[in-house]
Amino acid sequence: MADALSVIPASVLRYLSDKLYEKRKNAALEVEGIVKQLASSGDHEKITAVINLLTTEFTYSPQANHRKGGLIGLAAATVGLTSEAAQHLEQIVPPVLNSFSDQDSRVRYYACEALYNIAKVVRGEFIIFFNQIFDALCKLSFDADANVQSAAHLLDRLVKDIVTESDQFSIEEFIPLLRERMNLLNPYVRQFLVGWITVLDSVPDIDMLGFLPDFLDGLFNMLSDSSHEIRQQADSALSEFLQEIKNSPSVDYGRMAKILVQRAASPDEFTRLTAITWINEFVKLGGDQLVPYYADILGAILPCISDKEEKIRVVAREISEELCAIKADPADAFNVGAILSIARRQLDSEWEATRIEALHWISTLLNRYHSEVLCLLNDIFDTLLKALSDSSDEVVLLVLDIHACIAQDPLQFRQLLVFLVHNFRVDHSLLERRGALIIRRLCVLLDAERVYCELSTILEGEADLDFACIMVQALNLILLTSSELSDLRELLKQSLVNAAGKDLFVSLYASWCHSPMAIISLCLLAQMYQHASAVIQSLVEEDINVKFLVQLDKLIHLLETPIFAYLRLQLLEPGRYIWLLKALYGLLMLLPQQSAAFKILQTRLKTVPSYSFNGDQLKRASSGNPYSQILHHSGSQITEDGDVNQDNGNVPNGINFASRLQQFEQMQQQHRLLAKSQAQSRNSSTSFFKEGPKAEPRWPPTSYINRPRSRSSGRGPGQLQN
């Protein structure tokens, strides 16, 4: 201290702390001259003493003007040292950096000015303090004082120039500093950081690309900044890095893929688009490096398939197709289970397009890695079964395709159909809305005969009789109307002469017993007209209810469709198909006369020709009702229409019709007992509330019963013409 006081006049020290800038400036010039002389004489001890004096008595002084003077004095001393300043930097720079956090904005301003002048003198030697200077500049970038910010920007530009020309800069030491600040939200800091990233990336000798994973997430975070300028700067930096990635032979795709996957789910549209664009390029460029990350990537793009922004949807679909085209080996870290799990989770997505794409992936995995997927089936099977209730027809069809592939295994086949029946039982609306679609599709994908026989076996033991009846009626309607089941219908038509047809008839019969109309339809389809007539004759009063008549109405209309054209043509030979006539007349007698179905069937039967009967039959025809005797011809040796047997007609082609009829009657007795039980329960419930028992629905309505008979004809409905 004494050496310094002997070198610097007291007046200079006094003016150095003056409140007027001009006096401090002149005093600093004096200090510069003094230090220059000491440097020329090589007296570094006194130079050190001068610097210590400026530091302790001025820059660390409680007086603001002293601190200002000390800063300008240190800058002047550095200028005076010129080329020899480097050896004193460890004394000069720390007090200046300390002043960057001074409470007085003017002190902070002069600190920027002082460090700027120091940096201009020492240039590259300055790099040893780079991290501290960078930290100080980062804080000053959002200083409350505009003048300080302006001074900091000038200093920042100079430091960037120095770094770009220096060979002493350590990117390895700088990156941790950058990474710590990348997620700060202050817009000034963000601009500051992007500026440095861009500058350093432009230096050929600095490999910023190698450290990109360390600050990539921060750059993506800036894409959603409220400032358009910051978004633009971040996007520009990212575009530059992506171009470098395309041109680089070695890139760490894995670490960056994790970041991109997270950013693909960003609520900001621009961030999502940028992230998914990067993922698209990575999938094209990354090759084997990305195999362990396929599941994560798939999890990111599947939601984007349904994004509200079309550009994102297009890119996401392109990525999905590219990933799907890559045939990776599970032995090479390709995790089938992880991808399957991702696809399964996306089946719960609210967006149809995403669910469809997820199903495409499950189907692809099943076809390509069948054994691996079957080992993981327990993880996805329940979800796939639930997907059959999806609101989208396309989703349901894809799910059925997958189930059909899985159901090649007999155990899985039965499990699928058991669950289907369970779902239909729990949700009757599903049966109404999707039953036909599901059954028809399964019959196409799997063997229709196998599907129907298995369903029949399941329904035969169904405890819920009401549901069993509804389900059988649905299956019967599908069988009679669906083009996909035409081969099955043809097989049933051959039941009397074909062993496979007979087996199918017997298999279906067991569950079709739940519904009288289903059994009658099955017999008409299989051309077992005598048994159809026997079933009709076995019906009792309780069986003829509204539900039965509704089903009968449907059957009568179906008899007029091309499916039953063969039956209508058989009516051209009434002498040969006596039991067919008896069955149809039996149905006619069960229909209300005023119903449309009655009129349809009556009209059809009136067209039956009489010329094909033999002499005895013609005599009976002349009596006014050509079929009156035929309808009571129960003791004939004709077992089934068109065939005459010498035995009692009970077991043609191995079918024991008596046993079948008994089976039907037993099942119907169970349904009657259930109906009585339900009626008693309803009556008990209504009597509890002191209400009269509700009347059963009547068919036809009273309005039909009391309607006057038409005067256009002397015959009542149902009467035959002579």
Image: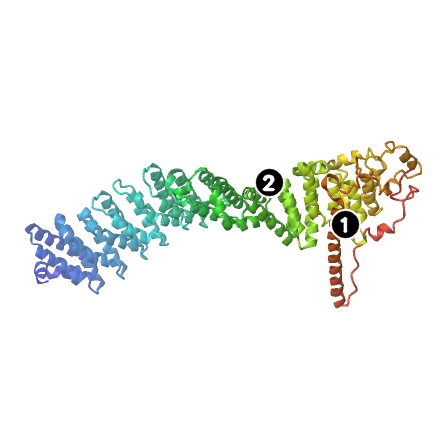
Outermost residue on the top side: it is 611
Residue 293 x %, y %: 40, 45
Q: Disc 2 marks which residue? A: 446
Residue 386 x %, y %: 57, 50
Residue 497 x %, y %: 72, 36
Q: In the image shown, does 408 or 255 lie closer to the viewer?
A: 408
Q: Disc 1 marks which residue? A: 548
Residue 623 seen from this side: yes
Callout 2: few (<14), some (14-19), or many (20+) C-alpha neighbours within 10 Å? some
- At label 1, the amino acid type is Phe
Q: Is residue 163 left or right of residue 401?
A: left
First in sequence: mark 1 vs mark 2: 2
| Residue drawn at (15%, 52%) of the image | 78
- At label 2, the amino acid type is Leu
Q: Residue 494's image quarter?
A: top right
Q: Secondary structure at mark 1?
A: helix
Any mark on residue 303, and which?
Answer: none
Q: In the image shown, does 56 or 262 lie closer to the viewer?
A: 262
| Residue drawn at (77%, 38%) of the image | 560
Q: In the image shown, does 371 or 432 lie closer to the viewer?
A: 371
Q: In the image shown, does 521 or 577 lie closer to the viewer?
A: 577
